Image: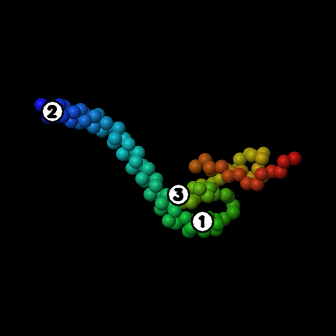
Amino acid sequence: MAKGHLWAEADKYADDLKSNRGTLRDELAELEKLKSKVRALIAAADIADDRSEEYGHFPDTKPLCPRCWMHYGEKQPLRQIDDPTHWAAYRCKECKQTYRFLPKEAS
């Protein structure tokens, strides 16, 4: 009878689903991490204008990473790096973003 064969197929599907349970949980955990990151970026976008305005009022004593400030509200100092092709270059130790300004004139 076909019902017995169909039941066997249903058992195969059940086995497949159960064997993938761990992988599916791992994928769900990754999606939850991604959701958290996206929520944080949305929150940063909601206050981006305010943070940008605040950034403009920081003292000029030490340059701070604009990305860290805008994305996370963190005041991370920039480190000046040697770049013979630009008059100024900086890198953030935290997010690794590099900023280069005004290329030097070719001789």
Residues tagged 2 and 3 counted as in contact (Cβ below 8 A): no
Report helix, strand or loop for mark 2. helix
What is the C-alpha distance between the residues marked 2 and 3? 61 Å
Please give the name of the residue rendered at 74% of the width and 52% of the height, measured from the top-left corner: 88
Please give the name of the residue rendered at 44% of the width and 50% of the height, measured from the top-left corner: 34
Please give the name of the residue rendered at 75% of the width and 46% of the height, measured from the top-left corner: 83
Answer few, some or many: residues within 10 Å of disc 1's Cα (few below 14, many 20 plus, some between 14 and 19).
Answer: few
The correct choice, above or below, for 63 with respect to 50 in the image is above
Q: Earlier in the sequence, mark 1 or mark 2?
A: 2
Q: Which residue is disc 1 drawn over?
A: 52
Q: Which residue is disc 3 drawn over?
A: 72
Q: Nearer the viewer, residue 68 or 45?
A: 45
Q: Which residue is disc 2 drawn over?
A: 2
What is the C-alpha distance between the residues marked 1 and 3? 12 Å
Q: Amino acid type of disc 3?
A: Tyr
The correct choice, above or below, for 28 with respect to 38 in the image is above
Extreme-left residue of the structure = 1
Where does the image place residue 42, in percent across and percent down from the top left? 48, 60
Residue 11 makes an appearance in the image:
no
Extreme-right residue of the structure = 107
Where does the image place residue 87, in percent across and percent down from the top left? 78, 52
Q: Earlier in the sequence, mark 1 or mark 3?
A: 1
